[in-house]
Image (cartoon, rainbow, N blue to C red):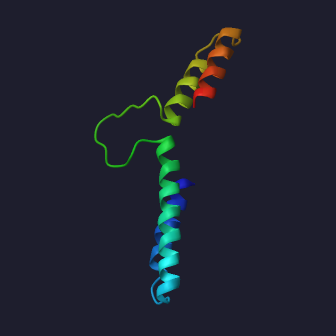
Amino acid sequence: MLKAAKKTVQTLEGLSFGLEDDAKEELDSLNTEMFKQVQELIELYVMPEGLKGIQRNPKKLNSQLGTASWYLGSRWDEVGENTENILRTNIRRS
């Protein structure tokens, strides 16, 4: 969904052709700000594009969700109170 939003913002950049200067500047300004916000949201979840090799960052949301999912899925019995406390603490940190 965020990639689609990014693509939409990039498409809007081409629509400023033929507009008056004031309208074009305002559209470009809004478009630039929207692109930055979408990019910031994407970077919360995944590593930046263009990196080579295996990249790990435990602060990325996907890493935290993956770790929690693995931990909960690997349990043989019900989740205990200590596990719930750890999960709550990690949620508050992020």
Asked if residue 21 shows in the view, the reply is yes
Spot occupied by residue 36 in the image (x, y as percentages of width and height): 47, 57
In the image, farthest residue toward the front: 22
Spot occupied by residue 58 in the image (x, y as percentages of width and height): 45, 28
From the viewer's perspective, is residue 86 above or below residue 21? above
In the rendered picture of this protein, how many numbered marks are placed on residues?
0
Residue shown at the point (53%, 35%) measured from the top left: 61
In the image, farthest residue toward the left: 52
Residue shown at the point (63%, 27%) measured from the top left: 92
Q: Say left or right for 50 vs 6.
A: left
Image quadrant containing the C terminus: top right
Spot occupied by residue 63 in the image (x, y as percentages of width and height): 49, 31
Image quadrant containing the N terminus: bottom right
From the viewer's perspective, is residue 43 above or below residue 17? above
Residue in the foreground of this view, choosing between 39 and 3: 39
Spot occupied by residue 82 in the image (x, y as percentages of width and height): 66, 9
Residue shown at the point (48%, 35%) measured from the top left: 60
From the viewer's perspective, is residue 72 above or below residue 63? above
Q: Say left or right for 55 vs 20.
A: left
